[in-house]
Image (cartoon, rainbow, N blue to C red):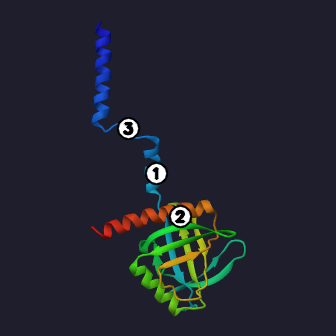
Amino acid sequence: MKVCARRFNLFLLLAAVLILSGGCKTDKQHEQDKLNKVVGALRVHIEVNPDEMGTSQTISVLRSEPVVVTIMKEPVLTEANIILAKVISSPGGFSVAVQFDEAGGLMLEQYSAANPGKHFVIYGQWSDKPVDGRWLAAPLITHHISNGVLSFTPDASTEEMTQLVLGLNNVAKKVHKSRFK
């Protein structure tokens, strides 16, 4: 009889600990926690003429048919300016659309209006590993962009861009949450 009572008390103690600790997380909660921790980086640079002051650098964009472009070393836009990023299906593939906040939208409009015929050069990193990042695209500036959205077709897989977009959206949530506190 004493064995059953002790066993019952052990189960009661275990149940009390689980209730007080809030229970255990489900696999879905663990997976969601992992997804919320994914980060991404996006840097938009502008094409410039080479200078001797050290403010420009020459890089190679695209892997299959590399294009050499001279860019301003400092990005004109970063992930800190992003409100929303998404992968969009398009005929023959996909593209990435990035919506910038008000300040980023103004920068995008100014640089696109002042530099027709040049390129925005986009660098993306979709994890905390440097190998998961590279120059993704160099879209030609054909008109000024007044809606704050930059769309481009990346030199990357859909999986890589899905990971990048997830990371960018996580960063955007954190940045904009802290801005409005």
Q: Residues within 10 Å of mark 1 (few under 14, many from 20)?
A: few
Q: Which mark is residue 34?
A: 1
Front-lying residue, 171 or 84: 84
Disc 1 to disc 2, C-alpha distance: 14 Å
**Residue corresponding to mark 2:** 164
Amino acid marked by disc 3: Cys
Q: Is residue 178 left or right of residue 32?
A: left
Front-lying residue, 17 or 67: 17
Q: Who comes first in sequence, dot 3 or dot 1?
A: 3
Q: Who comes first in sequence, dot 1 or dot 2?
A: 1
Where residue 153 appears, as percent x and y from the top left, is 62, 73
Task: Kindly identify the residue that appears in the image at 62 percent across and 62 percent down.
Answer: 158
Task: Kindly identify the residue that appears in the image at 68 percent across and 70 percent down.
Answer: 91
Where residue 171 appears, as percent x and y from the top left, is 42, 65
Q: Is residue 172 positioned above or below 113 on the image?
A: above
Disc 3 to disc 1, C-alpha distance: 16 Å
Task: Report helix, strand or loop for mark 3.
Answer: loop
Disc 3 to disc 2, C-alpha distance: 30 Å
**Figure quadrant of the N terminus:** top left
Q: Who comes first in sequence, dot 3 or dot 2?
A: 3
Q: Which mark is residue 67?
A: none
**Residue corresponding to mark 3:** 24
Amino acid marked by disc 1: Lys
Amino acid marked by disc 2: Leu
